[in-house]
Amino acid sequence: MGFPKNFLWGGATAANQCEGAYQVGGRGLANVDVIPAGKDRFPVMLGHKKMLAPNGAHRYPAMQGIDLYHHYKEDIALFGEMGLRCYRMSIAWTRIFPNGDEPEPNEEGLAFYEDLFRECLKYHIEPLVTITHFDCPIHLIEQYGGWKNPKLIEFYKRLVTVLFTRFKGLVHYWLTFNEINMILHLPFMGAGLVFEPGENETQTKYLAAHHELIASAWATKIAHEIDPENKVGCMLAAGMTYPYSCNPEDVWKGMDKDRESYFFIDVQSRGYYPSYAQKFFQRENIQLELSPEDQRVMRESTVDFISLSYYSSRCASADPSIDTTAGNAFATVRNPYLKTSEWGWQIDPLGLRITLNSLYDRYQKPLFIVENGYVEDDYRISYLREHIRAMKDAIELDGVELLGYTTWGPIDLVSASTGEMNKRYGFIYVDLDDEGNGTLRRTKKKSFDWYKKVIASNGENLD
Ligand code: BGP
């Protein structure tokens, strides 16, 4: 049986990690542009250090990216050569609305993406578009405080209406917010939040999340109205949380941790706030307004599919003295049964099958893995091979419905967490170093031909 015939094998990138050209084509400044490399990066991403304008003391990797803005034809031709059937990318909000609150969009930005989509279709590559991948116009942060302000829902509705109208027929797959649960972990990146000293961060983060969830429901409704062929997905930074032991305290901790993430998808997929979240809001004194109209849209316009990124499983213990390890922005208890990559992320292919099953059991909607990847070329092949096998088991043995698989970074790009080029997820090497020096020349790595073979055999030949 194997993978479905129309399975969407592909690769995934984000505007802010690739495009560069941050002042070209009428583009405005965004939060992602002013996230520096180096030691201030985390304080800024956490919303603890306010730096809304670039300064001479820092380097800003997103401003240059890998200059995909000027290389997209070449890059998409390479994706075509690899046989990608799907390219997940994101729109830079500030190319379409430079400030975010203008009444009319910027034609140059729209024309850029239109051409990019046409280029994809030339190679029979289906575009999968993330509407917001961590970006928010700086003006919306300065003027309105980012997503904690409900006005952003209106600006987002304007953005999506323009996108769905202009790209009707060119794009059929949309994701509303990348890793929506990231708002809890890196709130400046996830929602343009900068905290005042003493501010109740939990309240502000859930308020912003509430506005993103309403905006996401509206986007789904508008997408279906403009083109019934549109398929809209939510996107979760996924990875099942295992209890460290069978001690019920650990099991409870794991369940609680998972709910922190599932909360978002529960709303986007089921259309209402789950009871455990309502109890949590009461305890934390979090008051969220929901107009009858927004409530109706939330109920009626749930997502068509659930997309996820998966790099590793997670682990939780009730004992705070147990060792932890890095893992994206999600620090987690170290699982003694797993190996760790040189970047400190644990490796768990079976965890992918477990995560897929858990999501499918919970939502009974098609899933789409839109990120999964590894940094070192030789190990990348074995990492991807093992994850593809796990995915196949989930489809073949467990009956999970899976639409596709786009690996993270088919081409080397700027790391979201560290801002480095050095992580090198790509099948394609880009000559650019961590200081921003290099020719930007693209060359194929060993894994390029390997992935090409995997796709050509529809996942049968993994050697
Ligand atoms: C996810 C983000 C991506 C991407 C990926 C890898 O959280 O959606 O934007 O960057 O993680 O993370 P990193 O770049 O930190 O290695």
Image (cartoon, rainbow, N blue to C red):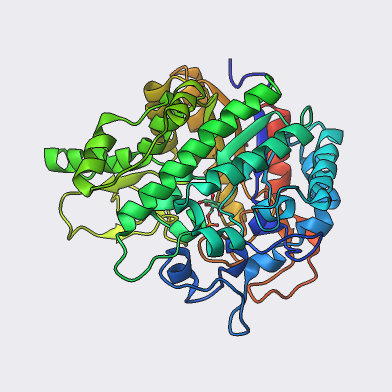
Residue 304 x %, y %: 55, 24
**Could you tell me if residue 113 is visible in this image?**
yes
Residue 260 x %, y %: 32, 42
Residue 94 x %, y %: 69, 55
Which quadrant: the N terminus?
A: top right
Residue appearing at x 65%, y 38% in the figure? 160
In the image shown, does 150 or 7 lie closer to the viewer?
Answer: 150
Residue appearing at x 28%, y 51% in the figure? 336
Q: Is residue 27 above or below residue 370?
A: below
Residue appearing at x 85%, y 49% in the figure? 73
Q: How many marks?
A: 0
Residue appearing at x 26%, y 35% in the figure? 278
Q: Is residue 56 above or below residue 108?
A: below
Residue 327 x %, y %: 41, 55
**Could you tell me if residue 236 is visible in this image?**
no
In the image shown, does 103 or 310 lie closer to the viewer?
Answer: 103
Q: From the viewer's perspective, is 304 left or right of 275?
A: right
Furthest toward the top, the residue is 1
Q: From the viewer's perspective, is 243 left or right of 386?
A: left
Q: From the viewer's perspective, is 214 left or right of 228?
A: left
In the image shown, does 25 or 418 lie closer to the viewer?
Answer: 25
In the image shown, does 259 or 439 lie closer to the viewer?
Answer: 259
Which quadrant: the C terminus?
A: top right
Q: Is residue 258 above or below residue 97?
A: above
